Image (tube, rainbow, N blue to C red):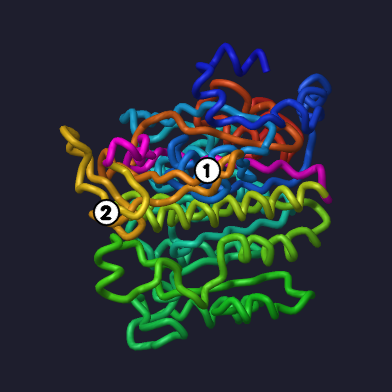
Amino acid sequence: MNTLLHLFSALVFLACTSPTLGRQDAAPTDGARRGPSRGSVIFIHPDGTGLAHWGLARVAHVGPDGELAWDRLPEIGIYRPHMRDSLAPSSHSGATVHAYGVKVPQDSFGMDGAEIPVSAGGERISVMREAMRAGLAVGIVNSGHIAEPGTAVFLASSPKRTDYTGICAKLLIDRPNVILGGGEAYFLPKGVTGRHGAGLREDGRNLIEEARTAGYTVVFTREELAAVPAETTHLLGLFAAVNTYDDRNEETLRAAKSPIYAPNAPTVAEMERAALRILARQPNGFFLAVEEEGSDNFSNCHNAAGLIEAMRRADEAIAVAEQFRVNAPNTLVLVAADSSASGAQLVAMPEKEGVIVAGKPLPTTLPNDPAPLDGVDGRNTVPFLAKPDSTGRVLPFAVAWASFEDGGDPVIVRAAGPNSALLRGSIDNTAIYRAIYTTLFGRSPDRATPNR
């Protein structure tokens, strides 16, 4: 606790920790004395989530005095997100740092210039592909399309982030055990219609048929995912043509009568559970990377309702991981974004001031403040209502936005399980790789002896 107090002001400390901090899991401190422990890893990447995003999630879903699953994780760190050539990361450069443990230019998708990076472990290989080489099971889960960098960079490198069809082809090369997300259109050739829409591939390849030939069970809906046979070892799930959500602003979604998330697509937590059923049966351990991408995309289009729903889903994924860890305590649960998207801010004031009042449409902006305000259905709609506080009060709030960009603000890291103390205090973004590597291989990457 003293380590945290000298790093954070009392205000930030109270905002982002829980009363259980330091009470759970004495193992990290003991493990730090004994040396690293080997185990499996669940890395949850709620993309674009800074401290303010979690504050919004808390008041919206459990109330200002409640606790999210995120709050209950015992270890906490402040992560410095800068890249080699920029103080702010991109999603693909942030993911590259997670996968390789070294700083790269901001425009990097598993690359360092024209080459794959030399990782902190000493080789031109990501930590997930190195885990596969060592006989561990691996999987990626994404609520966006499966070429999204937060998970795809662990398995693929590309000179161009937007080469979605090329990235999807690379994901299958090493036969990872689990690939679940959106993006069916990038697996099918033009002229072929799949379960969710038309294909977009220019090379004529049908990656779905190639996956089946390679031994994958392929599913397309929540119901099919739930019915996957118990003996399945390789699973590909494609639950939307592109993303499982519609990341446009509230006004556009309302006009189109489009839901925020596709109703027939599984949530990120449901995909995570399915992945864990497969990976947990593998004898050598596993590495699962799980991304809720909607938290970033809805922020970047200033859709506060979408953001708040995405945060609920991200926290549900954390709860699933923690439930798994209770039964498999040699599992590191690690939660980190790589940036804080669009400067989302909870805005509230006493209702007697007449600006943010339950049931009363919000102004476009606060007086003398150009930042746009969102209510439950976008601009000029009624405020959100928090869940009740400890006295039963229900208070209104709005969401203000600073930009449409991923910011360079520090990111909050939460963790539990073996080696989670490596993520305590003030850390660099490269520490994510180091904690994953240390847990999967039982040694620090500094002591790795790579086979070049």
Q: Nearer the viewer, residue 342 or 304?
A: 304
Of label 1 and label 2, which has the lower sequence position? 2
Asked if the magenta segment contains residue 6, the reply would be no
Inspect this view and state whether residue 160 appears: no
| Residue furthest front as drawn | 352
How many residues crowd mark 1 within 10 Å: few (<14), some (14–19), many (20+)? few
Q: Residue at x 35, y 35 (%)?
A: 349
Inspect this view and state whether residue 26 appears: yes
| The magenta segment | 327-354
Labelled pair 1, 2 in contact (Cβ < 8 Å): no
**Image height check: is 417 above or below 426?**
below
Q: Amino acid at mark 1?
A: Arg
Q: Is residue 372 left or right of residue 393?
A: left
**Circle 1 SS class:** loop
Q: Amino acid at mark 2?
A: Pro
Mark 1 vs mark 2, CA separation in Å: 20 Å
x%, y% of residue 194?
A: 44, 85
Q: Quadrant of the C terminus?
A: top right
x%, y% of residue 100?
A: 53, 39
Q: Which residue is mark 2?
A: 361
**Image height check: is 6 above or below 247?**
above
Number of numbered discs: 2
Q: Nearer the viewer, residue 433 or 374?
A: 374
Residue 393: image tag: 1
Quarter residue 220 falls in: bottom right
Q: Nearer the viewer, residue 387 or 168?
A: 387
**Image height check: is 159 above or below 84?**
below
